[in-house]
Image (cartoon, grey):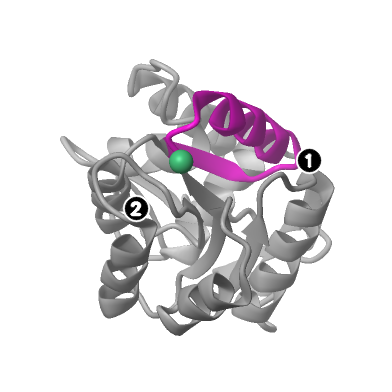
Amino acid sequence: MVASILIIEDDEGVLTYLKEFLFEHGYNVMTATAGAKGLAIIKKTAPDLVILDLGLPDTSGETLCRQIREKFSDIQIIMLTAKDTPQDIIQGLKLGADDYLTKPFDAEVLLARIQARLRRKTGTNANLQVGDLKLDTQTMQVTRAKKELHLTAQEYKLLEYLMQNMGKVLTRDMILNRLWLSSVDIETRIVDVYVGYLRKKIDRAFPKKLIRSVRGFGYTIKE
Ligand code: CA
């Protein structure tokens, strides 16, 4: 399961460090330095988990937490804050945060908390299937017609995202946001390049093609 995480934090040093740390641990990471931009990214991409700093320049983390909870009940929220009195912690949890970490914190501890939150969220949905193409999110094994396919990390993430949304059209922007760091300036053409790589591996040897282009929009996978 390649999960997407949005970090909302105005301290650029903490933000950059966390972004790289989590990206290296295989997550799709998006970032925002203010609440308004964070909320816009949430509405657009519905990440699996949000790391939310309580002290933001444009809005309080408390307000943002409530706004996220009103519309997205299944997004996991981990709050980061310098405040650490029991009242602050209780307040954060009351507003809908799932967990709470006080600064300064250890990145490995945050990682463990993230893994615990995401395990709870994903439950047992381990296998994805489209026709004779199968993807096991626990072992990360991909097979087509029982033959194992060897994908790179990015190809795997792309395939998993397509299969999680079987039959739905994913735009190039959606794929770009999900697979690459949002702050890096990448052209949407890279999506076409990676879809090309993936097609070579999962479709080329088979008469029945599963990945379809939707002209002007993006891509979908279906039987
Ligand atoms: Ca702050």
Judge left or right: residue 49 versus residue 55. right
Q: In this view, does 176 lie above or below 86?
A: above
Callout 1: helix, strand or loop?
loop
Residue visible at 37% across and 67% down in the picture: 65
Q: Are marks 1 and 2 in contact (CB under 8 Å)?
A: no
Judge left or right: residue 161 versus residue 18. left
The label shown at residue 150 is 1
Residue visible at 46% across and 22% down in the picture: 193
Screen quadrant of the C terminus: bottom left
Label 2: which residue? 45
Screen quadrant of the N terminus: bottom right
Q: In this view, does 222 lie above or below 108?
A: below
Q: Is residue 75 above or below residue 26?
A: below
Callout 2: helix, strand or loop?
helix
Q: Is residue 16 a member of the stretch shown in magenta?
A: yes
Q: Is residue 89 a member of the stretch shown in magenta?
A: no
Residue visible at 64% across and 45% down in the picture: 27
